[in-house]
Structure formats: structure tokens, C-alpha cells
Amino acid sequence: MTDIEYTPGPLLTAAQTTRTALWNDSADLDELRQSISFGGVGATCNPVIAYTVIRNHMDVWVPRILAIAEAHPTWGESEIGWQAVKDLSVEAAVLLEGIFAEHEGRNGRLSMQTDPRFHRDAKALADQAVEFHGLAENIVVKIPATRVGIAAIEEATFRGVSVNVTVSFSVAQAVRAAEAIERGLDRRAAEGHDISRMGPVVTVMVGRLDDWLKAVVARDGVFIDPSALEWAGIACAKKAHGIFQERGFRSRVLAAAFRNVLQWSELVGGDLVVSPPFQWQQIINSSDYEVVERIDVPVRAEYLAELARLEDFRRAYDVDGLTVEEFETFGPTARTLRQFLAADADLDALVRDIIVPAP
């Protein structure tokens, strides 16, 4: 990647001096180019992000959506919208091809998320994951960490898909998903397939867990040190990372859904991926923060004690705090699935307004 003009700052220092990989939390091409200059080596996307990218670049996407509709006269708005998502994802993946080759598949990947409307159908999720995997060699496909999703994660991995586990907020979800990936990799290797360039990751949506616990505190009128509520997701990500290292999982933890700079600085040094939105990257990289490896620094005991007063934190932090059957009904899971489903509906509405404009 000698043609990249790198931007000095804490992000670049961390990328160059630690095992921690930076991925951009968006497939926006302008943001991704700048993230690469910060040392970024990958990117993620989801229904909310895809909708936002299209909405923010209507000058580009209105004519493109109209062209998709003209080329496929029988398609409805959902098919047209998803084709636009595929197109923007493939174009973002091109920016990462050199990194993908340099890192031999471990990084340089663009995440695409399976349609959240398939969340009840493991076969549909696995089949769509295979489809997306075929769009570009450096695609990694998001599948939710639900009961149905765990089955799809194993099957998609077995079929050669590098999976990015998403809709995941707890140590239990991260570990069960990593175990599913291990089963899929073992099955694939047993059939003689090369798995050396596969690059699975398991997301912990750190900020969305924090969001949920703050909502629980407000709902239930809990008097609690508010500082502790900024550390729940970090605590779960640190614990999950430690378990992944101890058990030798071939996937990496990916920390996403950032709400503060601690969700980067406290994880630096780990063999994991951090995926801040671009706006957080700008804040971090323009600061004078001196990079320190803090992945092995425990969350303060008093914060953990405060958080342990909340049942949903205990469920998220304990490796056996949730059964696979409980994943989908866990508060932040249900809330995030609903948001992703709503983003699908928003994209449908946007496409509908373009192809059938109001009189």
C-alpha cells in the first residue's frame, strides 16, 4: 500500500505498533479512503449504514437506482434497494483489495450484512451469505448472533464464507458464535478445503450494550454511578478477548457501535478489531493522546460492582449468562434487530419515492 499518504496521529501509531486492527464503521467511499490513511485495514456496514450512505449521496444514487429499476422492470423496491447495497459494498471492497492481499485475507475486508428480514431462517441467511461472499473475494458477511444465526454462522463458514458475527452484545453470544465458527472451519478443513485465508470476526456491539443498560436504569429508576455505565461494553469486550486468546479461537473479537473514545483506547493492544465510525476516528486522530496498550488493564472493580447490580449486565458479562435460546430475546438484541428491520423499511421507502415519485 505504498501509494497511500498516511495521516499521522494516535490511530496510525496504534495501527503500526500494536496488533489492534482499525476498520471503518461505514462503506462510504470518502470516509473509507480517509480511514485507510489513518491506518484502517477494513470496513463494516449494516442496514442503517447502507441506508445512510445512500441517503447522504442522493446526487449519486438517485440516477443509479433509476438505472437499476430500468434494467430490472419486474423488481420491487426491496430488490432494487438491495442491489444498490450490493453495488456500494463491492465498490468499497475495491479500495481494500491491496490490503487484503498484503494481509492474506486477515484484513482488507468489507462487511456486508445479511437481510435482517431473514432472521428466522438459517438456510436463507447462509444462502445469502454465500451469495454475498461471491461478490468479491474480500467480502466478510454479517450474520446475527441469535439461535437461528448461530446455525447459519456454522453452515456459512463450512461453505467457505468469512463471517462477521453481528447483533452481539454479550460474552456468551461472542463465545458461542466463535465456537460455531470453529465447527464450520473444522468441517471445511476435514473435506480438504483451504481455510488459511478466511478471516472471521465476532462483533461485540459495545456501545449498544451501554445504551441498553442506560435505558434499563432509566426505566427502572435505578440510582447508580453513571460513570459505570460507560464501561459495560468495554468490560464484555475485554473479557471476550481474553477467552478467545485462552481458547485459541481462529476468529477475532471486533468492537463496534462506539459511543466514546474509551471504546478504542481501552482495547488497544489486543489481537482484535476496533471499528469506530469515521467521526470518532477524526476526534481520536486529531488528539494528542499517547498510545498505551490497555487491553489487559482490568475495568475498575468499583465499576464492575456497580454494573453487577444490573441483571442484564450480569447476563452479558457471564460466559454462561445467556443460553443460545435466549439470545434473540435479550434486550439489546431485540432492540437492534428492530432497528435493522426499520432501516430495511426506510430503504424500501426511499427507493419507492424515487421510482414512484409523488404527483
Image (spheres, rainbow, N blue to C red):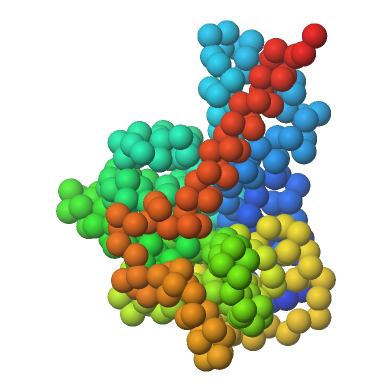
> 50 and 340: which one is in front?
340
Quarter of the picture containing the C terminus is top right
Q: Is residue 267 placed above or below 328 in the rendered structure? A: below
Residue drawn at the location 62% of the way across and 18% of the way down: 68
Q: Is any part of residue 87 visible from this angle?
A: no
Measured as percent of width and height from the top left, residue 107 is found at 51, 58
Q: Picture coordinates of residue 219 (x, y %)?
A: 59, 63
Q: Nearer the viewer, residue 217 or 70?
A: 217
Residue at x 70% of width, y 35% of height? 54
Quarter of the picture containing the N terminus is bottom right
Task: Provide residue 181's location: percent of width, then percent of height.
Answer: 31, 57
Report the residue at 70% width, 45% height from top. 28
Q: Is residue 63 above or below residue 261?
A: above
Q: 86 above or below 299?
A: above
**95 with respect to 139 (left or right):** right
Q: Give residue 84's position: percent from left, percent from top.
A: 61, 29
Left or right: 41 in relation to 310 = right
> Residue 132: which quarter of the image?
top left
> Does 32 sit left or right of 129 as displayed?
right
Number of dots carrying numbers: 0
Q: Residue at x 62, y 43 (%)?
A: 48
Q: Is residue 291 above or below residue 30?
A: below
Q: Is residue 291 visible?
A: yes
Q: Is residue 86 left or right of residue 175?
A: right
Furthest residue toward left: 190
Q: Quadrant of residue 343?
A: top right
